[in-house]
Amino acid sequence: MSSPPPQPTPIASCSFCGKPRYDVTTLIAGESAYICDACIRDCGDILNGDTPTSGPAIESPRALLEHLSSRLIGQEAAKRQLAVSVFHHQYGKRGAGSSRLLRKQNLLFLGPTGSGKTYMMQSLAKSLNIPMVTVSATAYTQTGYVGDEVESMLRFLLERCDNNVERAESGIVFIDEIDKIATTGSGPSETQFRDVSGAGVQQDLLTMMEGTVVRLPANGGPRHLAQEFTEIDTSNIMFVASGAFVGIEDIVEQRLYEKTEGEEPEEHLKRQENKLRQQVLIEDLIEFGLLPEFAGRFAAYVSFDHLLIEDLLAILRNPNGSPVCEYQRYFQAYGVELAVEEDALLALAEQAEALATGARGLRSIIDRCFRDVLFDLPEWTGVTRVAFGREAALGMRPPQIDR
């Protein structure tokens, strides 16, 4: 009696979404189940309270502006421009059929580090459930050099959309550090590192930002003849480029009027730079080092201001996203009240302002401030309250501990 023919080995697939191994980037095996990388990201969003919505939750640019204002302090002009551009990018299809009544608007962000450029874009994309990827311009080189080709950023966007081409074609590509691929410059920017293919990267981005059909290897990896390709139309993909553009204020000041002589207070200089940055024109970007045709691909230049002490204080007091509030919730989980007095908040803001790292510097300063009590927190018994005054925030004396 002949034995039955061997059964084919079943293809492993995600136990949550059902996608087979060949249709996901990573598939992790458990004792009796599998989970793919996309479902892991979704689980992380759920745990962080960022469950994606099934439909648009924002009904107008004004509502989107209010949403951004609840999460980001200051930058009113930037938030308003971004609310208008992204809302109409997402809902530009009106009327019969699928024709887009408004063309997409590529944006260029200019502002100092820590001013909220990346955070604002990420918060907005999450609010509207728009697929978005963040890449660094310094990771790309012109075709023929060692490094990633610019088309690979579309591959990242497609992977973020679980290879859903239609969804990816309405997504956002956020290109950070775009000022680092400028080819020439003046003032302080001349001494920055310039990749030899910076002009080539700008050239490669031109057509893709304007709108074209890009053929990507279906399974990733390098191109070769014997492979399938996935076509993605970039006509409705919004490209947002961002950079500090150190020194561009000097270019604008030289164009507008003669540079003022003498030393000015630090806060006055920052306010002056904020005003100059708001007046950047295409000729200033060209002088900084962007190619004329590349600078012309952006519909608007969005200026971000230096965060002054009052802005940093508002961030510390804001219940949405403040590192202090985050630590207060953490201490509360141990049954301990964390009290940070007003003069302590001012001391933290002054330290961050002195470092000139904006909101990004607040995290490291606060972490250093709470480091010792965090070390002892899990072992405390009978402690009900920890209070930080100005001297404790500056590390001049321990905080007050109540039992």
Image (cartoon, rainbow, N blue to C red):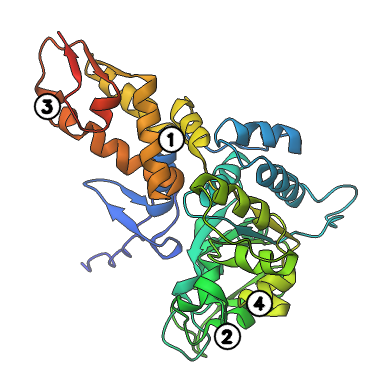
Residue that numbered label 4 is attached to? 287
Amino acid type, mark 2: Gly
Q: Secondary structure at mark 4?
A: helix
Q: Secondary structure at mark 3?
A: helix
Residue 229 circle label: none
Amino acid type, mark 3: Asp
Observer-nearest residue: 186 or 119?
186
Measure how far apart labels 4 and 1 are at the Cα level.
Answer: 46 Å
Observer-nearest residue: 37 or 125?
125
Measure how far apart labels 2 and 3 are at the Cα level.
Answer: 54 Å
Kindly check if marks 2 and 3 are in contact, taking CB atoms under 8 A apart as contact.
no
What residue is shown at x 69% (from left), y 70% (from top)? Answer: 284
Q: Secondary structure at mark 1?
A: helix
- Could you tell me residue 366's position as x and y percent? 31, 36
Q: Nearer the viewer, mark 4 or mark 2?
A: 4
Q: Earlier in the sequence, mark 4 or mark 3?
A: 4
Amino acid type, mark 1: Ile
Residue that numbered label 2 is attached to? 200
Amino acid type, mark 4: Glu
Q: Quadrant of the N terminus?
A: bottom left
Residue that numbered label 1 is attached to? 46
Q: Nearer the viewer, mark 4 or mark 3?
A: 4
Residue that numbered label 3 is attached to? 376
349 to the left or right of 228: left
